Amino acid sequence: MRFKSIWFATAFFLVPLRMVMGQQIFPAENSTSANPSRDCAVEFNKVGTDGRAGHPSQPHTNSQNNLAKQVENEVSTRPILHLDWDMALLKEKQSALAQCILSAEAQGSPEKAQGDCSEMLLLNFAMRHDGEAERDIPIGHLPGSFAFFYESGMTIDADGAPNAYHPDNSGIDDLENAGAPGTWEGLAKDAYGEPFIQGPNDPFPGFYVSETALADRSKAVNDPARYVDASKIPFLVMPGGLAGQLGAHVGDFAIVFNERNGKSSYAIFGDFGPFDRLGEGSVALAENLGIRSDARNGGARRGVLYLVFPGSGERRPRTIEEISDLGQKLLGQWETGISAAACGGLKSTSPAPGNQPAN
């Protein structure tokens, strides 16, 4: 990972939400009707009755606190999802949100965007590089769902991989990305702040034990198996302060899209990153998306869409199978929720920023 800090970032602001009604979400097979509201209703009914979007009779109106249990306990067939349409929709909405912000700022001040764009805008995150402003990343939301989305690049995180860091800097990631003596952030440490080194019975003897914020707390702090292995588990990284504002915790689920090649991957929120950077994923996530996964020289500058389901996890590591299975159920609920909201069937359901602290 890039050197981390979980201090609260002042680089974003909160805005109120309003609902947008009467919008067709999924493309109809026959789009010649002169009645958009009817088209929307017909398409939503089709989605609900063919199993593509979960259970329309149980819309996504539960609280975030109950979301994880609901997904875990739900017994159903695996939904047939619209991944291509989902990516196209998110890309369209992200572009519209960015254009709205630019237009509002051109007409007045940055604060004007808070009102003009509040139908979708949750936060406007200011990316920085070496302390200098780089670009803003709008974080959006669609009526009918708790999920939030954003578009960024992807820096590659190797944290949690047992071969991530070595004292002589021969690991798969540069040792400076784990911090420095006295301020180690990517390494598991003893009570005196000294990093643990793997022994003869560990996966990579002589390498440091690399840690992640998401961890199996039943295992010892010097056990490499306690942490989420970036080389095997697809996970994303967010600043701790930002995650807290959006009600997200490590262990929550997500789906990530690569706009360039159309590939997608379910993922888990696995680690905290720098307070002024957004857009980071594990080695395994990059591989799933067809992005160069070298932690030293890989990644993508733009074109990666993230859809995160806050409150959906239990703050514990998951297997690849669990991430995929639960991610599909959540995406099915998301499709159902936004379809129903667009057809006027639901009131807007938005995240509750700031109601829970970051892990």
Image (cartoon, grey):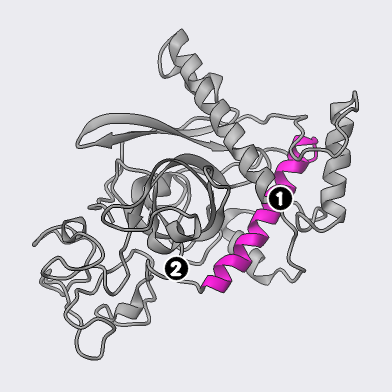
The quarter of the rendered structure image containing the N terminus is bottom left
Q: Where 326 falls versus 337 (above or below)?
A: below
| Residue 331 belongs to magenta span | yes
Q: Residue at x 79, y 35 (%)?
A: 344
Residue furthest out toward the top = 107
Q: Residue at x 77, y 42 (%)?
A: 340
Q: CA distance from mark 1 to mark 2?
A: 24 Å
Q: Where 242 falls versus 333 (above or below)?
A: above
202 or 56, nearer to the observer: 202
**For the residue marked with disc 1, what is the amino acid?**
His
Estimate the x, y position of residue 63 in percent, counting from the top left. 62, 53
Estimate the x, y position of residue 41 in percent, counting from the top left. 86, 38
Q: Is residue 242 left or right of residue 351?
A: left
31 or 298, nearer to the observer: 298
State the mark number for residue 35: none
Q: Magenta residues?
A: 320-346
**For the residue marked with disc 2, what is the amino acid?**
Ile
User: Looking at the image, can residue 89 be seen?
Assistant: yes
Q: Where 339 falls versus 187 (above or below)?
A: above
Give the residue at mark 2: 233
Give the residue at mark 1: 82
**Callout 1: helix, strand or loop?**
loop
